[in-house]
Amino acid sequence: MAKLTDDADYDASETFANIPSPLELIPKILTHQEPTHRNRFSVIHKNLESNEQLVLQTDEGGATVIMDKKQYTEKMEHTLRDRTTYHISNKDPTMKINGILSGMLKDMHRNEEIDAWTMNSIIRKDARPPTAYGLPKILKE
């Protein structure tokens, strides 16, 4: 770089002529970035799913487990067959239970046992039935 001796020698247009604009840099930055942890996990996850395997989080400890879909399905079916814990329902009771809860909360609000904010924060307008999923357990030795 040449040393400037006088302000008259300085030409700003020449100084910035070779610097690309930020819009020109964006594609270069994006293509030269290392894949993020999330992207790597997503690629691994898709590859495992295509090979009939599941990626599951454990119920405790935050560990990740890779399991065959067939094995997972068999374990879940075995768990759900336990009639002492689960029973088959012909219809979804979620809306009925939600209606009962809403009525109880409105009564409590009317009797000034709870305020309106508490009542509205507990009442669910988008209630959904629970989802059954099995988290693998890792036993500590």
Image: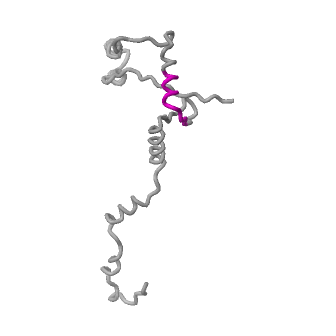
Residue 22 quadrant: bottom left
In percent of width and height, residue 116 lies at 32, 21
Residue at x 58%, y 27% (from the top left corner): 137
- Residue 35, compared with residue 59, is above or below; it is below
Residue 130 quadrant: top left
Is residue 120 highlighted in magenta?
A: no
Query: Which stretch is magenta?
Result: 64-76
Name the one closer to the observer, 65 or 113: 65
Colouring chosen for the image of the structure:
one colour
| Quadrant occupied by the N terminus | bottom left
Is residue 70 highlighted in magenta?
A: yes
Q: Residue furthest right?
A: 141
From the viewer's perspective, is 66 left or right of 120?
right
Name the one closer to the observer, 66 or 4: 66
Q: How would you classify the magenta stretch by its main secondary structure?
A: helix
| Quadrant occupied by the C terminus | top right
Residue at x 60%, y 30% (from the top left corner): 138
- Residue 45, compared with residue 111, is above or below; it is below
Residue at x 50%, y 25% (from the top left corner): 134
Whether residue 108 is visible here, answered yes or no, is no
From the viewer's perspective, is 10 left or right of 37?
left
In percent of width and height, residue 31 lies at 40, 59
From the viewer's perspective, is 25 left or right of 56?
left
